[in-house]
Amino acid sequence: MLSPFDMCFTWAGIHARTRSMLNRLSALTVQMELLEEAAPPSGEVSFGQTLKASRAELAEASREARALVEAVGAQLPGAKVADLNSAISDTLAPLHRFLQRRETQLVGPTGDGNLEVAVEPELLRFAIAAVIDALLAPAVAGEELHVQTEQRLGKVMLSFRLLTRRAPPERAAVEGQLTSVRSWLEMRGGGIDVSAAADRVSVLLTMCPATDGERC
């Protein structure tokens, strides 16, 4: 079963290909119109009729391609507004029992409140869950997971920091599990950064504030 991210990128890829097809058909239609204008005088009636018929077929194909682009575009989630703290709470609430079983201490979320970001709420919750899963998969009992929010430099920051009791998971391994999250954030003007030290590994998600979504 495809994840929300995989589904999103599948539709995005189809949408890009259909738009490319529409652009090519539109360009061919214009070229055909130019050929029709430059056609020989009325003595070559069959040639002119052939050009006209071909242009009509191209125009019909362009209309069908445009309808396909619109239909595929309707399957793509539009950039909406998500309340960051609500998304964190909604995602962490079902995980409290899981964290207790793992003996992982959750610290936070701390930081700025009332932050809204220009992303889809459902995908934001999925991203948060994906980050927590990537960090806690190799964790051992007694480790701490710190969650913090912040707004600075025109971006909203959501950081996860796992304080470890042994060597932290490799940065490349964590990044590999968050490839889809990175792609989705970059599509929305944000990004992701994974860093590691001797006793911790951190994941920082950056997103556009809701008010700056179009300019971010």
Image (cartoon, grey):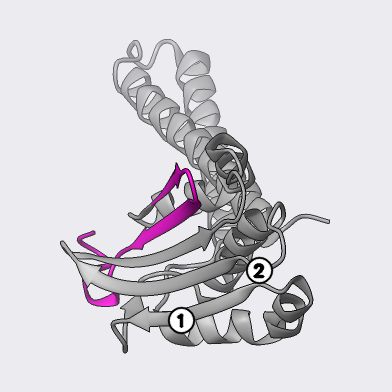
**Residue at which label 1 appears:** 108
- From the viewer's perspective, is 168 left or right of 119? right
Position in image of residue 105 (x %, y %): 60, 76
Badge 2: residue crowd in 10 Å (few <14, some 14–19, many ≥20):
some
Would residue 149 be counted in the magenta stretch?
no
Would residue 206 be counted in the magenta stretch?
yes
Three-letter residue code for mark 2: Gly
Q: Give the Cα distance between marks 1 and 2.
A: 16 Å
Asked if residue 209 is positioned above or below residue 202 in the image, the reply reads below
Which mark is on residue 8?
none
At 48% from the left edge and 32% from the top edge, which residue is drawn? 25
Position in image of residue 120 (x %, y %): 49, 72
Position in image of residue 194 (x %, y %): 45, 46
Magenta segment boundaries in residue numbering: 192-216
Label 1: which secondary element = strand
- Tell me which label, 1 or 2, sits earlier in the chain: 1
**Residue at which label 2 appears:** 142
Asked if residue 196 is positioned above or below residue 122 in the image, the reply reads above
